[in-house]
Amino acid sequence: MSALPPLPAPPLPGVDDRWAMFLDVDGTLLDFANHPDQVVVDTRLRELIEDLHAALDGALALVSGRSLDDLDDLFGHPPWAMAGLHGLELRGADGRYRGVHIGPARRMRVRDIASAIASSLPGVMLEDKGMAVALHCRAAPWQFDALRESVEATLPALAGYEMQPGNEVIELKPEGMDKGKAVATLLTARPFHGRQPVYLGDDLTDEHGFATTNLESGLSVRVGYREPSLARYALPEPAAARAWLFRVLHALKHGALSHAHSSGGIA
Ligand SMILES: O=P(O)(O)OC[C@H]1O[C@H](O[C@H]2O[C@H](CO)[C@@H](O)[C@H](O)[C@H]2O)[C@H](O)[C@@H](O)[C@@H]1O
């Protein structure tokens, strides 16, 4: 099988461009860690996003599989728009929340089923995210196929839930929402409306975001290598994504940096 041609690096914004940025978190802004609680959001990254948010007049959102509470804790309760749990939780730029509601009995049932799966597969770890759960196998990647099969087998008993595979993880989440729908929803309102979407993501769940972005004539940027992908641009790793965002900020504030001056970002 022949390899696909490499994707180009994304361009920087021109003077007339009005971008709206949608940023995935794990594997895009943040380097992967062995456990979800071990990721590092350093001050430079926090300030970079803060400055981008200001330079884009608020048209910046985090789009993540993590819950909004988790994102708020990680990033210090910022005023940015956010889509949590793959869009099941959505907070607009105006701070208004809209989200799916799943009652405590159904949450408990999903958690119990997921907990039984984790107990049956050594090395698999359960992350309880409220209405969704993640079963992680980063500590035991050889369990991925068995994990996927176990989760798949539970679906007939979990009406209204679907399986979402990701990076060393299989999630169980309520159906009906994905990151692409979250981006489309955010784009209907100020300050996103009328701007060109620019979406950065690394994982399968980000393909929905890429699809919406492409439909809106935006820039879909895959971080890391994964094929097939709908992305039209690529950056090799989170450090390169952070360095590129640093150059975007400079371009928004002062015009584009030359490549020679751009390599010392905040990777
Ligand atoms: O949509 P994202 O922001 O990329 O979130 C996707 C999932 O990220 C987290 O799991 C992933 O990152 C962990 C920390 O680096 C890593 O240990 C794990 O293997 C990855 O799958 C998070 O824990 C999940 O809830 C998110 O859905």
Image (cartoon, grey):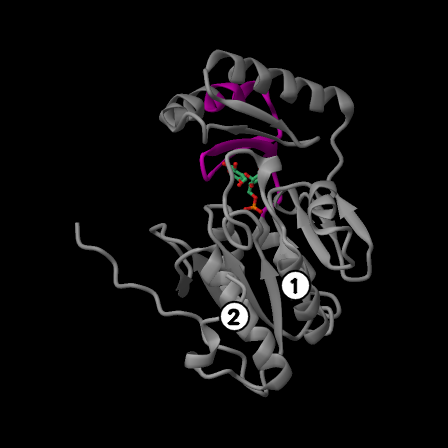
What span is colored magenta in the figure? 151-178
Confirm whether the magenta stretch covers residue 110.
no
Q: Which residue is mark 1?
A: 49
Q: Is residue 2 visible from the viewing direction of this image?
A: yes
Image location of residue 32, percent across then percent down: 50, 43
SS for tag 2? loop
Earlier in the chain: of badge 1 and badge 2, it is: 1
Write the residue at 66% across / 75% down: 194
Viewer-nearest residue: 113 or 61: 61
Looking at the image, residue 144 sits to the left or right of residue 174; the answer is: left
Q: Which residue is mark 2?
A: 218
Q: Position of residue 105 (x, y in %)?
A: 75, 19
Residue at the limit of the structure toward the left, as seen here: 1
Residue 230 spot, x, y in % from top left: 41, 58
Task: Locate residue 128: give its quadrant.
Answer: top right
Q: Residue at x 55, y 50 (%)?
A: 30
Q: Can you say whether 236 is above or below 122 in the image?
A: below
Mark 1 and mark 2: span between their CA atoms? 20 Å
Residue 170 position, x and y percent, is: 49, 31
Judge by depth and name the residue closer to the eye, 216 or 47. 47
Residue sitting at 46 percent across and 46 percent down?
204
